[in-house]
Amino acid sequence: MSLLWRILAILFLALAIVGVVLPLLPTVPFLLLAAWCAGRGWPALEQWLLGHPRYGHSLREWRRGQVVSRRAKWAASVSMAFGALVLQFAPVPLAARIAVPVVMLIVSIWLWRRPEQ
């Protein structure tokens, strides 16, 4: 079972790394998942993630009580709005052009309802 948690942790960490480069793919949610999986099967990776100089604070705050900083809320909201705008010009089905921004709006509302401190 430990091997499964390690594989999932690596998968989510890889997605988070890709999210650093691609503006439409989130980074922190994948880091949250990676830390959660690592906590079940790879404590050393979990500690490394929690101690990371850039993302560790956000991970620790989330664990403390689903706390999300205002700066992170703004960054996520602007990124989602930009992604929704870009999607309108992409060659995708109309259903995707409607559904994806609706989901992003729901996520944004949920995000802004998280505590900040």
Image: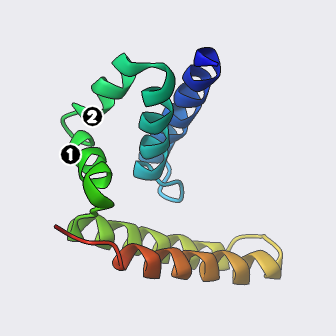
Disc with the residue nearer the chain's start (2 vs 1): 2
State how far apart marks 2 and 1 are (Cα).
Answer: 7 Å
Residue at (62, 83) in percent of width and height: 102
Q: In what quadrant of the picture does the C terminus appear?
A: bottom left
Give the left or right position of residue 64, taking residue 97 as reference: left
Q: Where is residue 64 in the image (x, y as percent from the top left)?
A: 25, 52
Residue 109: image quadrant is: bottom left
Q: Where is residue 4 in the image (x, y as percent from the top left)?
A: 64, 22
Classify 10 Å Cα crowding around label 1: few (below 14), some (14-19), many (20 and above): some
Residue 70: image quadrant is: bottom left
Q: Do the residues labelled 2 and 1 touch (CB within 8 Å)?
A: no
Q: Position of residue 108 (x, y in %)?
A: 45, 77
Q: In what quadrant of the picture does the N terminus appear?
A: top right
Disc 2 residue type (three-letter): Leu
Q: Is residue 47 above or below residue 112?
A: above
Classify 10 Å Cα crowding around label 2: few (below 14), some (14-19), many (20 and above): many
Q: In this view, does 70 lie above or below 61?
A: below
In the rendered image, which residue does mark 2 sit on?
Answer: 50
Residue at (77, 70) in percent of width and height: 91
In the rendered image, which residue does mark 1 sit on?
Answer: 57
Q: Where is residue 41 in the image (x, y as percent from the top left)?
A: 50, 21
Frontmost residue, 106 versus 99: 106
Residue at (48, 54) in percent of width and height: 26
Task: Give the SS element for disc 2.
Answer: helix
Colour scheme in use: rainbow
